[in-house]
Image (cartoon, rainbow, N blue to C red):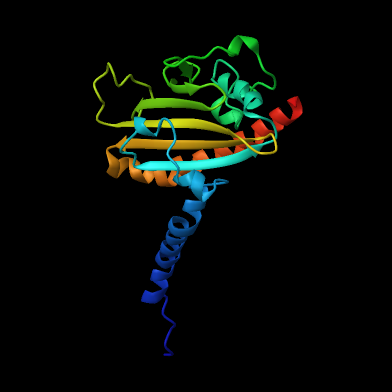
Amino acid sequence: MPNQPSCRRRPGARLLPLMATSATLVFYALRLRPRLLTWGATQDESGRTYPGDELVPDADGTSTMATTLPVPPETVWPWLVQMGVDRGGWYSWDLLDHYGRPSADHIAPEWQHLAEGQRLKATRDGQSWFIVARMNANRTLVLRSDLRLPSGHSFDPQWDVLPTAHMDGIWSFHLRPTADGGTRLVVRTRGQSRPRPLTRPFDLLLGEPAHFIMQTRQFHNLRTRVGAAA
């Protein structure tokens, strides 16, 4: 009786998917991820220290992204001041971070009052928020967020007992005038989360890519808005 061909896979064939996955992860870690975390920023901008960095001194995750806007900082600033779920939105993907409501396409006087210590709602129910941690008009806006995990609800680190599982971070906006009358907008994030063995995979696989998608969209929409208003 003639020999029948074996249906068993060769050992080498079993390794191919693992090798492909490993190569993809190495490419992402060494080539793609550094570019995502510093999108649009110069080496000097990425390496610089900014106001608000000191709020998360032992950050285990950071990014610095930047863009150039065609108007001076004084024109960009009012758009940043009115951010918030119950204010002008975030100018990003509204379906994802503003419950589908369009972010403001104009400067609203009623949203132009902002002060350090003020809360900006991040969710409609008010259980998650940003705190205005640092503010220097036309120059710097630092928003701080302290979240319990896995609920994603905010807590006040000055008053509440630190949760075992939590995520603390800043989202800071830094404006610098350019020689041609525009604005260099640099956005810095710094974060720390615990327990790290559980939060690290989340940061790498979801948190960092999501921030890249949302931040680049915000850059685009801000550029469109300030350009139309100029």
Name the residue nearer the viewer: 142 or 146: 142
Is 156 positioned to the left or the right of 212 in the image?
Answer: left
Residue extending furthest top? Answer: 110
Q: Give how far across and how far down residue 95 sits, in percent.
A: 59, 29
Q: Residue at x 50, y 17 (%)?
A: 124
Find residue 204 and report its horizontal and vertical position in percent.
41, 46
Nearer the observer, 141 or 21: 141
Q: Nearer the viewer, residue 72 or 188?
A: 72
Q: Is residue 122 visible?
A: no
Q: Residue at x 35, y 32 (%)?
A: 54
Say if 122 sits above or below 187 in the image.
Answer: above
Residue 92 x/y as whole percent = 60, 31
Which residue occupies the extreme bottom position in the image? 1
In the picture, the quarter occupied by the N terminus is bottom left
Q: Nearer the viewer, residue 179 or 167?
A: 179
Q: Residue at x 36, y 75 (%)?
A: 11
Asked which quadrant contains residue 152, the reply is top left
Q: Quadrant of residue 113?
A: top right
